Image (tube, grey):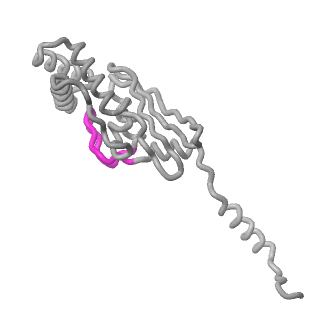
Amino acid sequence: MGIGAFITSGEDKQTVSNTIQTSQPAMFTKEKALKRVQDYKIQIDLQSPTIVKGTTLFEVYEIRGKIPAVKNLGWNVTKTDSGKYLVNHKEETDLGINEPKWEVDANSIKAVNGAALKNTPELGESQKDTGGTEFEKQVYEAFSSLYKKYSEDENLEQAEQKALSETANKYQITIEQVRDIFTRLDKAKYGL
């Protein structure tokens, strides 16, 4: 036997082969991106319905899907040109389609729209100013406060109607004007 030569058993060769195969970097797949978002635990307590901090996003949308006013339309994952994935959950409410989106790779999750920021504000950039006039900001805050208050004890549809009606009466404007102001300022706040 010359210098540097050694003999290994068949079992040793298999161990070396397995080590080489498992040391390859794991591919980050569409399925892993979805699981990463669904398994993410929220860092805040949510209202309407009450969902406690530490609940996974998968559980959040399962709970919300049990509310009669919310129609759960499911999860979707698409690959971006940059090689990352966009993961979204789509649901329909009386206010329209809600579709939070997160950008995901092997190392991070980032909320990319206002709907995602509402449940995972820590995953986004800081919120923007709502914009609007001083009057519109007062309407926005009044509606938001009333909606939060009523949604703790009532279903979402009733909470929204009561908050819209009371805000409209308080500021002597129509329910549609309240809805328009809230929608416009909320979009500005979350960069939609």
Q: Visible in this render: residue 153? A: no
Identify the image quadrant of residue 127. top left
Horizontal arrangement in the rendering, residue 31 relative to residue 101 (left or right): right
* Residue occupying the point 36% across, 33% down: 114
Residue sitting nearer the eye, 66 or 137: 137
Q: Position of residue 15 (x, y in %)?
A: 72, 70
| Residue that appears at 82% across and 82% down | 6
Residue at the far left in the pictured view: 170
Left or right side of 152 for 39: right
In the image, which residues are magenta? 41-56
Q: Is the magenta stretch mostly helix, strand or loop?
A: loop
Asked whether 160 falls inside the magenta stretch, the response is: no
Image spot of residue 137 (x, y percent): 19, 27
Residue occupying image coordinates x 30% and y 23%: 184
Say which of 41 and 4 sits in front.
4
Residue 45 in the magenta stretch? The answer is yes
Give the quarter of the image for residue 120. top left
- Asked if 104 appears above or below 190 in the picture, the reply is below
Left or right of 37? Residue 81 is right
Q: Is residue 38 above or below residue 163?
A: below
Q: Where is residue 33 in the image (x, y as percent from the top left)?
A: 53, 44
Quadrant placement of the C terminus: top left
Question: Where residue 52 sits in the image (x, y, percent)?
Answer: 28, 44
Could one spot residue 162 in this view of the protein? yes
Q: In this view, does 74 lie to the left or right of 94?
A: right
The residue sitting at 25% across, 28% down in the picture is 131
The quadrant in which the N terminus is found is bottom right
Quadrant hosting residue 49: top left
Task: Please count the marks in the image.
Answer: 0
Q: Residue furthest right?
A: 1
Residue 87 higher or lower than 169, as above or below? below
